[in-house]
Image (tube, helix red, strand yellow):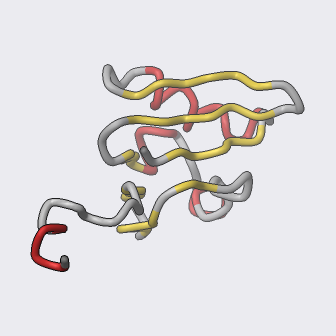
Amino acid sequence: MPKIYVIDVPEFSGLVRCAREQGEVRVTRVQRGYFIISSARDLVFHRRACGFKPAVWYTCLSGGIEGRIAEYGRDVLRVEDDAPDRSHAFLRQ
């Protein structure tokens, strides 16, 4: 399950807002000034929908992540689960 840890500051509130607008994404507020954004699927965000200028966009992961950054360009961020694919585990036995 991919997770993004978002520092609770006004600059990153657009990411939290966009996450809350996605039906399959969970936003949890934790103590110590963080939100956790998580989903059973890939986390995908678009810079302009979050209302971010490039400088804020490229620092929005500064709180940390769990998962693998699959795409992080000028306009799209995609974090996917980094768990190994076990669908063909029987072939490795």
Task: Using the image as rendered, state which of residue 69 and residue 40 is in the foreground.
Answer: 40
In the image: residue 66, left or right of residue 26: right
Residue drawn at 40 percent across, 28 percent down: 25
In the image: residue 40, left or right of residue 61: left
x%, y% of residue 22?
A: 35, 25
Q: Quadrant of the N terminus?
A: top left
Marker count (numbered): 0
- In the rendered image, the vertical position of residue 76 relative to residue 19, given as above or below: below
Residue drawn at 76 percent across, 25 percent down: 30
Residue drawn at 62 percent across, 23 percent down: 28
Please identify the residue farthest to the bottom as the structure is shown: 92
Task: Using the image as rendered, state which of residue 82 and residue 44 is in the foreground.
Answer: 82
Residue drawn at 60 percent across, 55 percent down: 65
Please identify the residue farthest to the front as the structure is shown: 93
- Quadrant assignment, res 90: bottom left
- Quadrant assignment, res 43: top left
x%, y% of residue 19?
A: 46, 30
- In the rendered image, the vertical position of residue 1 relative to residue 61, given as above or below: above
Q: Quadrant of the C terminus?
A: bottom left
In the image: residue 55, left or right of residue 51: right
In the image: residue 12, left or right of residue 73: right
